[in-house]
Structure formats: structure tokens, C-alpha cells
């Protein structure tokens, strides 16, 4: 296949290369894809949604946090927590790693 592919197309195409895989990584990548689509939609209407500009706080790197950074961080956390393959995330927008619900995500294999 030549030309550009979407992440979804790539996942479907490549998962057949691993017939014994559980599908957990494909599910994880799909949640990242979903969060990216949501953030992209908001970027396209950022001026209308008031999600641009500084918040007035700093991230763990000492950089001024931007509204869009925090918005994206929240959307990625929500998308990843909704999948039982992920037990937590670490982000420069968080002071510490964030652990997800232990009951819901008790069989999780990934930290993102």
C-alpha cells in the first residue's frame, strides 16, 4: 500500500502480522487516536472555545502551562482511562504520575 494512511488503517493492516496478539495494544492506540481527534477538533475552533493562551501556572518542566496543553492532557487521560489496558499516565502537565481506578483497570498492561 502506498500513499498516506490513517492511524486506524495502519492498526488494522498491521495487526494481522501478529496473529497471537490479544488486541490490547491496538485498543490502546485507538484510544490515543480518539483523544487526538478530539483535541484536533478543538484546535480547529480554538478561538471560539477560549482554550488558547496561558493559564498562569507552570508544568513540571517549569514552562508556563497553556490552556490547550491542559485541555489535551485531560482528553488524553479520559480516553486512556476508559480502556482497561491502561493503569496510569505520566505527563509534563501533571506533578506526578496519575494512577487510574484499580478495580476498573486491574488487568492493565500499560502506563502511557
Image (cartoon, rainbow, N blue to C red):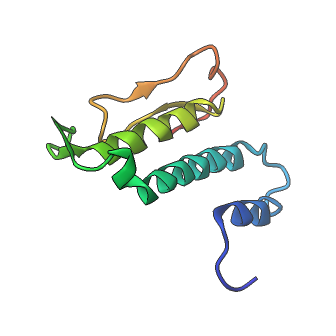
Q: Position of residue 98 (x, y in %)?
A: 41, 27
Q: Position of residue 64 (x, y in %)?
A: 16, 45
- As drawn, the residue found furthest toward the bottom would be 2
Q: Nearer the viewer, residue 103 or 35?
A: 35
**Residue displayed at 48% across by 35% down:** 77
Q: Of 25 and 49, which appears nearest the observer?
A: 49
| Residue sitting at x 31%, y 28% | 96
Q: Quadrant of residue 87?
A: top right
Quarter of the picture holding the N terminus: bottom right
**Pick the front one: 8 or 28:** 8
Tally of numbered tags: 0
Q: Is residue 112 visible?
A: no
Residue 83 x, y percent position in the rendering = 65, 33
> Can residue 85 be seen by looking at this rendering?
yes
Give left or right: position of 45 versus 53. right
Q: Residue at x 57, y 16 (%)?
A: 102
Task: Name the residue rendered at 51%, 23% in the picture.
Answer: 100
Which quadrant of the structure image shows residue 18?
bottom right
Which residue in the rendered view is the most extreme toward the front? 48
- Compared with residue 12, is residue 76 higher up or lower down, i.e. above or below? above
Residue 76: % across, % down: 49, 41
Amino acid at each position: 500500500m502506498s500513499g498516506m494512511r490513517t492511524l486506524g488503517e495502519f492498526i488494522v493492516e498491521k495487526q494481522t502480522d501478529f496473529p497471537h496478539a490479544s488486541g490490547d495494544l491496538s485498543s490502546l492506540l485507538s484510544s490515543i487516536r480518539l483523544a487526538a481527534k478530539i483535541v484536533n477538533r478543538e484546535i480547529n475552533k480554538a478561538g471560539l472555545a477560549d482554550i488558547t493562551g496561558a493559564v498562569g501556572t507552570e508544568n513540571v518542566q517549569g514552562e508556563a502551562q497553556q490552556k490547550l496543553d491542559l485541555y489535551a492532557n485531560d482528553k488524553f487521560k479520559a480516553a486512556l482511562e476508559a480502556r482497561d489496558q491502561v493503569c496510569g499516565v505520566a505527563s509534563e502537565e501533571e506533578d506526578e504520575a496519575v494512577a487510574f481506578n484499580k478495580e476498573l483497570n486491574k488487568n492493565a498492561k500499560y502506563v502511557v
